[in-house]
Amino acid sequence: KAGVTQTPRYLIKTRGQQVTLSCSPISGHRSVSWYQQTPGQGLQFLFEYFSETQRNKGNFPGRFSGRQFSNSRSEMNVSTLELGDSALYLCASSFDSGTSGYEQYFGPGTRLTVT
Amino acid sequence: AQKITQTQPGMFVQEKEAVTLDCTYDTSDQSYGLFWYKQPSSGEMIFLIYQGSYDEQNATEGRYSLNFQKARKSANLVISASQLGDSAMYFCAMSSKAAGNKLTFGGGTRVLVKP
């Protein structure tokens, strides 16, 4: 079974631009979560999508948004990029039948650099 | 609110020896899950082991075991017979029934295995 895939793997953008990152979950997984990892703040939860609906949201500004398609693929968008948005963005998928405790499997991440 | 604390920023371990990585957690939820992930320099988060709050037995997965002490709110990871490929960052994380699939991560412990 194929793992979680993320595209692109590396991205360089300039301040003020916007960016879209993509995540394809493991086949059969309906939950997709996004995390931001920076040296200063560590790993922080951005949001989770389940069956095309945002189910949970972290404490990030509205510049960060996402969506999920009917095939469970998810995209996240960051508008008006700031230098502080430079980070590794990780996507995780989970089977999730509705209770907690399901392992989340992460993709390789997208490393975003904002100059 | 949930909190994960990993007090060991970094440690060295001799090849073939066992190593224990500390993790303490704080939550008011009764139903929760504890996870350990490994992150090599490539950036991908690799799921290692899971322990549910109602599981009476400590979880084991190959060379990984989780020493779960509920009353002390600790969930230490034990890696037996360390290998050079175990050199990586290790993150303890938790989710809860209330938080759904949202993972709260600790700051991580960097392990370097010496030959």
Image (cartoon, rainbow, N blue to C red):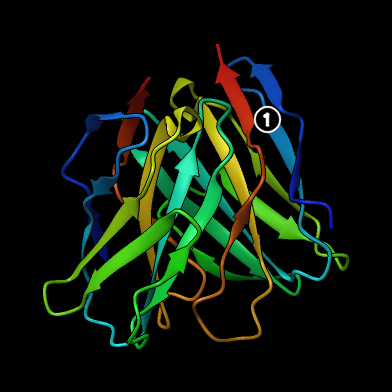
Q: Nearer the viewer, residue A23 or A115?
A: A23
Q: Position of residue B65 (x, y in %)?
A: 37, 61
Compared with B49, B37 (above or below) is above
**Is B59 left, or right, of A18 in this rendering?**
left
Q: Position of residue B45 (x, y in %)?
A: 54, 44
The quarter of the displayed image where residue A102 is located: bottom right
Tell me the element at label 1: loop
Residue B1 visible to an observer of this rendering: no
Dot 1: few (<14), some (14–19), or many (≥20) neighbours within 10 Å?
some
Q: Chain of mark 1?
A: A
Residue appearing at x 21%, y 51% in the figure: B22
The furthest residue to the left: B72
Q: Nearer the viewer, residue A19 or A16?
A: A19
Q: Position of residue A74 (x, y in %)?
A: 75, 54
Q: Nearer the viewer, residue A106 or A18?
A: A106
Residue bearing mark 1: A18
Quadrant of image for the C terminus of chain A: top right
Q: Nearer the viewer, residue B88 or B86?
A: B86
The quarter of the displayed image where residue A50 is located: bottom right
**Is B66 left, or right, of A111 in this rendering?**
left
Residue B12 visible to an observer of this rendering: yes
